[in-house]
Every structure is written in C-alpha cells, then in structure tokens.
C-alpha cells in the first residue's frame, strides 16, 4: 500500500496484456500501487507464455523479431501508462518503465536514440525509459532527462554507480530546467536480493547473519541519494522478490520501508505485504551501523568490489539472454 504522507510508493514489477486490462486496474483503484516496471525478462515471460499476444503477433508477419517485440511492448506500456495516467496527473507517481534493448548497454548514442524513439512511439508522458547504469548509460540518462524524458536507472549494485547516476541525472535535470522545464522524474533502481542469493551460503559458514547484505547495501545507497536530496530523484528498491521459503515473502519490502522511496515487487510479494499490518519505516539506518557491517564482511575476506562487478556482469548477461531468447521465439 502506498503512503503519500511518507512519499513511499509501491510499484508492480510485472506486465502482461490481460492482467493490464483487469487486475492491474483494481490494484491502482484500491491505492495499492501507483506505478509499474518491466524488463526484458518480464516481457520474455509474458510474450512466450501468454495467449494474449497471438492475434497481434499473427498480424506482424514479415516483420523482424525486434519489430514484433517492440509493437507488442509499446502496446502494453501504452495500456499501462493510460491506466496510471490519473495517478500521474495528481502527482501520485503513475509511471511505467520500459527498458532499452539490453544489447545497447555499451552504446550511448544507440541508447539515447532508442529511448527517444520508444518514448515518442508510446506517446504518453508518464513513461520512464530504463537505462542500465554502465559507463555508456550515464551519459544517456543525462541526455534523456535534458529532453524531458523521465529515466529509470537500472542494475545499480554499487554506491559508486549510484553516485554517478546522481551526477549525470542532476546535470540532465538542470539542463531541462534551463530550457523552461516541466514535469520530469528519475529513479535509481538498487537491486537487493541478488546479493543475498550470491553470498548467504558463504556468510553462514563464517557465522554471520544471512539476508543482510542486500539490505545494508541498499540502505547505504539510500543514504547517499537522500544526502544529495533532489525531489525529482528517488531510490527505487528492485529485485525484492524472495526465492525459496527461508524468508517471509515480503521481507525486502518491510526491511526497506523508507520515506521518499519506491519499492517495485512481483505481485505475490505485494500480496504478502498487504496481508500483514503495516510497520514503521526501517530506513534510514545510521552510517556507522552500515559501515560496521561492511567492515565485518571485509574482515571475513569478502571483496565487495568484486561482488559488485560480478552482479552487474551477471545482470547484464541475464537481460541479454532473456531478450535474445524471446526474439528467437517470435521470429
């Protein structure tokens, strides 16, 4: 459930055509969510498993696989944006995100051109273009924001990535303001649960608590973003679904409940969150507590920079594979 007083937003990390026309509308009307996100893996799953796309796919014979994908994705994102438009018009978020082709992650110019093209093709103002936080992506974020196109920076694992996002996003927002400005926003999507899936077995062997690294890392980045407070830039906690039965399904929503933030989560995670009583915000944490945790990790031999690099590499490759597999399935 969103909390407008705290400026806490809950977005749904899921897109599928029939869902968007039915249950999605109910979630919005009941004030449970005020935004949504998508990524190549989500679209790959929807397009390859749902019968809702068959008719449109049949009408796209002769098009390339990427042209088919874009036609499907643009229609879904437009549908979601229109459903969220009232929230957007009443300053209650109302954004839906679409990611650029993951194979453009090292191509600044290609990312900018695709972001502009998708935004214009969808034709709704409450669309965020998702851009991976790579060296090429930072400049693309700045350029898109300078044109009044909202941006979702994705695949953030390290504090340094967040700092660079802040730098380039702030520059883009200032450039847009200098042209007369308008409504434009940005989120920095910090991935959470992947740290714990990667490290928990080794941490347990060292006698350390598990399911904490993702939380502390996200809390550290949240503090960085809030100390550089810009109303138009918020932390978005992503990768908040729980795999397995070792943790409550809504663990990463409750532990990261924070003012001036967004949590995007799968439907099952949101349903689990709604089933329990709301709690007080858990963030911010004190820097001393966060730094103490990472000092313990270092003392146990964990190299966080290597972890950050590994998770970013794996994340980029996973999105590329999902995108490629989906394209092959609709050739």
Image: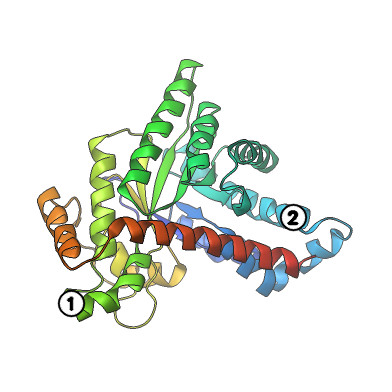
**Image position of 120 (left or right of 210):** right
Secondary structure beneath disc 2? helix
| Residue 241 image point, x, y percent | 39, 69
Q: Is residue 30 visible?
A: no
Between 142 and 280, which is closer to the camera in this rendering?
A: 142
- In 3D space, how far apart are the residues under numbered discs 1 and 2 (Cα atoms)? 47 Å
Placement of the C terminus among the 4 image quadrants:
bottom right
Please name the residue that numbered disc 2 is placed on: 66
Image-quadrant location for residue 85: top right
Query: In this rendering, is residue 243 above or below 158?
Result: below
Q: Residue at x 61, y 66 (%)?
A: 322
Image-quadrant location for residue 186: top left
Q: Residue furthest front?
A: 301
| Residue 155 image point, x, y percent | 44, 53
| Residue 264 image point, x, y percent | 41, 58
Please name the residue that numbered disc 1 is placed on: 206
Say which mark, if any, is on residue 305.
Answer: none
């Amino acid at each position: 459930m969103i909390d407008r007083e705290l400026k806490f937003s809950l977005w749904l990390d899921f897109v599928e055509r029939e869902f968007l026309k039915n249950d999605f509308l109910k979630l919005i009307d009941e004030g449970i969510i005020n935004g949504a996100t998508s990524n190549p893996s989500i679209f790959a799953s929807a397009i390859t498993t749902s019968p809702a796309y068959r008719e449109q796919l049949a009408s796209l014979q002769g098009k390339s696989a990427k042209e088919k994908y874009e036609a499907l994705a643009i229609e879904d994102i437009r549908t979601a944006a229109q459903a969220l438009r009232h929230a957007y018009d009443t300053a209650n978020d109302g954004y839906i995100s679409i990611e650029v082709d993951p194979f453009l992650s090292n191509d600044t110019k290609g990312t900018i051109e695709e972001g502009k093209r998708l935004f214009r093709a969808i034709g709704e103002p409450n669309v965020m273009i998702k851009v991976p936080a790579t060296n090429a992506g930072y400049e693309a974020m700045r350029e898109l924001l300078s044109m009044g196109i909202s941006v979702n920076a994705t695949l953030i694992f390290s504090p340094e990535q967040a700092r660079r996002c802040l730098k380039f996003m702030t520059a883009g927002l200032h450039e847009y303001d200098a042209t007369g400005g308008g409504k434009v926003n940005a989120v920095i999507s910090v991935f959470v649960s992947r740290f714990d899936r990667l490290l928990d077995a080794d941490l347990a062997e060292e006698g350390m608590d598990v399911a904490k690294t993702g939380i502390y890392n996200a809390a550290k980045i949240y503090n960085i973003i809030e100390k550089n407070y810009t109303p138009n830039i918020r932390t978005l906690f992503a990768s908040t679904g729980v795999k397995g039965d070792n943790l409550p399904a809504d663990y990463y929503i409750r532990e990261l409940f924070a003012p001036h933030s967004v949590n995007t989560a799968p439907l099952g995670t949101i349903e689990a969150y709604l089933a329990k009583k709301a709690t007080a915000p858990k963030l911010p944490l004190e820097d001393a507590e966060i730094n103490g945790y990472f000092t313990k990790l270092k003392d146990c031999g964990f190299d966080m920079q290597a972890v950050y690099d590994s998770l970013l590499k794996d994340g980029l490759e996973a999105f590329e594979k999902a995108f490629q597999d989906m394209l092959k399935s609709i050739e």
